Image (cartoon, rainbow, N blue to C red):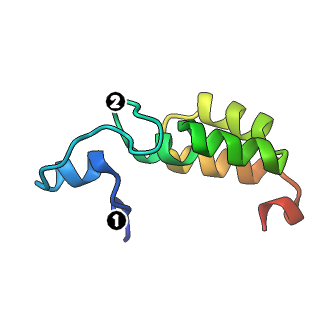
């Protein structure tokens, strides 16, 4: 229903919006969903500070999509961490 609604630079370009693809927080060449939430330097710092980096990193490197990553994370975390 809401697939593709988050305005990453890659998704904006896919919708015809002319903008640079580079990530504004870490200068990675492509700002896409998986990068913003799991691979950017800012996202990594957030996950490290929450103590969930090991789970998130494992899920993001072994998943094929953003949704798969989220599902993998939710499956292995205790309910209080998921919330």
In primary-sequence order, the first of circles 1 and 2 is 1
Bin the neighbour count of mark 1 within 10 Å (Cα to Cα): few under 14, some 14-19, many 20 and up.
few
Residue at point 47%, 36% (across, down):
26
Residue 72 shows in this picture? yes
Q: Is residue 44 above or below residue 78?
A: above
Of helix, strand and loop, which one carries label 1? loop
User: Is 64 left or right of 47, judged from the image as shown?
Assistant: left
Q: Looking at the picture, how far across and down is residue 29, in whole percent?
A: 34, 30
Disc number lying in front (1 or 2): 2
Q: Which residue is mark 1?
A: 5
Of helix, strand and loop, which one carries label 2? loop
User: Is 53 left or right of 51, judged from the image as shown?
Assistant: left
In this view, the residue in front, 40 or 26, is: 26
- Give the CA separation, mark 1 to mark 2: 21 Å
In this view, the residue in front, 60 or 9, is: 9
Q: Looking at the picture, how far across and down is residue 54, in whole percent?
A: 79, 34
User: Is 8 left or right of 34, judged from the image as shown?
Assistant: left
In this view, the residue in front, 27 or 37, is: 27
Q: Is residue 13 above or below residue 55?
A: below
| Tag shown at residue 29 | 2
Q: Looking at the picture, how far across and down is residue 36, in whole percent?
A: 49, 46
If the image is split into quadrants, where does the C terminus sit? bottom right
Residue at point 31%, 37% (across, down):
22
In this view, the residue in front, 37 or 25, is: 25
Residue 62 shows in this picture? no
Residue at point 22%, 42% (across, down):
20
């Amino acid at each position: 229903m809401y697939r593709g609604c988050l305005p990453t630079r890659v998704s904006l370009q896919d919708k015809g919006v002319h903008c640079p693809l580079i990530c504004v927080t870490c200068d990675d060449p492509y700002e896409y969903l998986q990068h913003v939430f799991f691979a950017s330097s800012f996202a990594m710092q957030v996950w490290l500070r929450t103590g969930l980096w090991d789970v998130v990193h494992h899920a993001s490197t072994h998943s094929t999509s953003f949704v798969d990553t989220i599902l993998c994370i939710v499956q292995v975390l205790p309910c209080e961490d998921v919330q």
